[in-house]
Amino acid sequence: MFAKKRLELSIEKPAFKRACRILEDAGVKGYTAFSAFAGYGGGMRWQKGTDLSASQDMIMIISVMDQDVIEKVIDALENLIGSHIGLLNISDVTVLRDEKF
Amino acid sequence: MSSELILSTLLSPIVLFFILGLGAALMRSQMSVPESFAKGLAIYLMMAIGLKGGVEMSKTALSPDIFAIAGVALVLSFGMPFLAYMMLRVTSKMSRVDAAATAGHYGSISIVTFVAATQALQLAGIVTSGYMVAMAALMEVPAIMSALVLARRGMKKEGEVAGSEKGELFREVFLNASVVVLVGALAIGWMTGEAGMEKIAPFFVTPFQGVLCLFLLDMGLNAGRGLRQGWRQLDAGALSFGIIMPLIGAALTAPLCWLIGMSIGDAALLITLAASASYIAVPAAMRLALPKAQPSIYLTLSLGVTFPFNLTLGIPLYIILAQWVGG
């Protein structure tokens, strides 16, 4: 069993590609993204829209990585959610296969 | 004639379905149109309107009149955000960046309002030109540039776009879904002409009205939800801007239509385009370029206030205005 960090980023769709680039450039071995259905924040409810640009949608990105990798991405992601709508959570997790992360 | 026009527009199936969706959302109904289906409907509508415009364009040669209309369309799209920005700064308590982002929406256009206006004109027996679809596409983008210029003035940092992100913004502005589908379908319609259209007419012409009803039901739901969730973000000045700005846009465009001698149908469409506000292309570009601007403000105004106003009362008013100035 190996100790790792789990990053959970909820980010508005227009900034999604920027978040992916930050993770990839830092050498993250993998991440999974999925579309959020609805939520509440900033004093109002929101839900996934039907417009073509999807500019109001929120995307959740989950990735597990080593401590040294998370240190590389954290400042850039903090900057990103400083200007865009988003939330960042980091937690400790245990994984079975060290080489996958 | 005027009251007949207003009544026939208000009682058309497309407007009634929009009102149904709007009312359902305001009364907190759980009704919804599946997301992928709604997006498919939007692509279908843009393809159909682009193809139809392209086919009509293939029948007429390019003339100086068309270039004059294109020039006016570009000036309107570039210029209207500056006027909208000044109005917002005077009448509401909006921040500079929110006012700039909102102003960008009012220089760009709503393709659904354009489609609804063509349907109302068709109902009134007024002829329009196919190249007006090209004018709609032309007016989508310049307003975004004006919004960025406005945001940069006096607050450099918030209006700046980092070098690495310029490409992303460029793609969003010039290659967003509505521009690609609309311009692409227009070009295909132009190239294939009437003969090409005959082959696909059972899919793109006959069911068009029914699909538009479905789409407007979804638009009504979106507008109602947006209004219900976002109206608290707007003060009285901002709310009244959502109705006054389209009327100012229409009033400014009408004399220009007269000046370049546009037909009634084309003038009505250009006035409608100038009076409409974007809620697809511009919000996406603003999220990239001006992320500090609050989407709950500009989307509630363009989709929750201006769009319903234009669809119900605005379009008949713009047609009446065009009848005064059109040749």
Image (cartoon, rainbow, N blue to C red):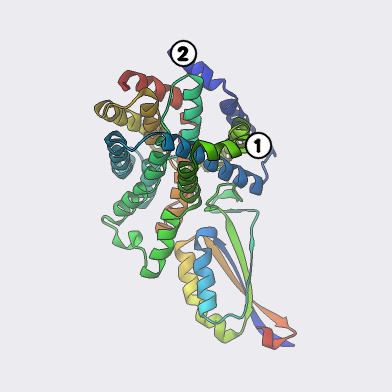
Q: Foreground: B283 or B231?
A: B283
Q: Foreground: B267 or B274?
A: B267
Q: Is residue B275 above or below residue A67?
A: above
Q: Amino acid at mark 1?
A: Arg
Q: Chain of mark 1?
A: B
User: Residue at image x 29%, y 53%?
Assistant: B149
Q: Foreground: B258 or B195?
A: B195
Task: Please tell me whether mark 2 sits on a helix, a strand or a loop.
Answer: helix
Where is residue B26 shown, x and y percent of the image? 61, 34
- What residue occupies the far left of the structure in this picture? B259
Q: Local crowd at mark 2 within 10 Å, few (<14), some, or many (≥20)? A: few
Task: Please tell me whether mark 1 sits on a helix, a strand or a loop.
Answer: loop
Q: Is residue B288 above or below residue A19?
A: above
What label does residue B28 carry, if any?
1
User: Residue at image x 47%, y 76%?
Assistant: A75
Say which quadrant the N terminus of chain B sits in: top left
Q: Chain of mark 2?
A: B
Side (left or right) of B89 relative to B12: left
Where residue B29 sits, quadrant-wise, is: top right
Where is residue B105 shown, x and y percent of the image? 40, 44
Mark 2, mark 1: which one is toward the viewer? 2
Q: Is residue B86 visible?
A: no
User: Residue at image x 63%, y 33%?
Assistant: B207
Where is residue B177 shown, x and y percent of the image? 51, 51
Q: Foreground: A12 or A78?
A: A12
Residues flagged by tags 2 and 1 on a common chain: yes
Q: Local crowd at mark 1 within 10 Å, few (<14), some, or many (≥20)? A: few
Q: Amino acid at mark 2?
A: Ser
Q: Earlier in the sequence, mark 2 or mark 1?
A: 2
Side (left or right) of B202 relative to B91: right
| C-alpha span from label 2 to label 1 | 32 Å
The residue beneath circle 2 is: B3
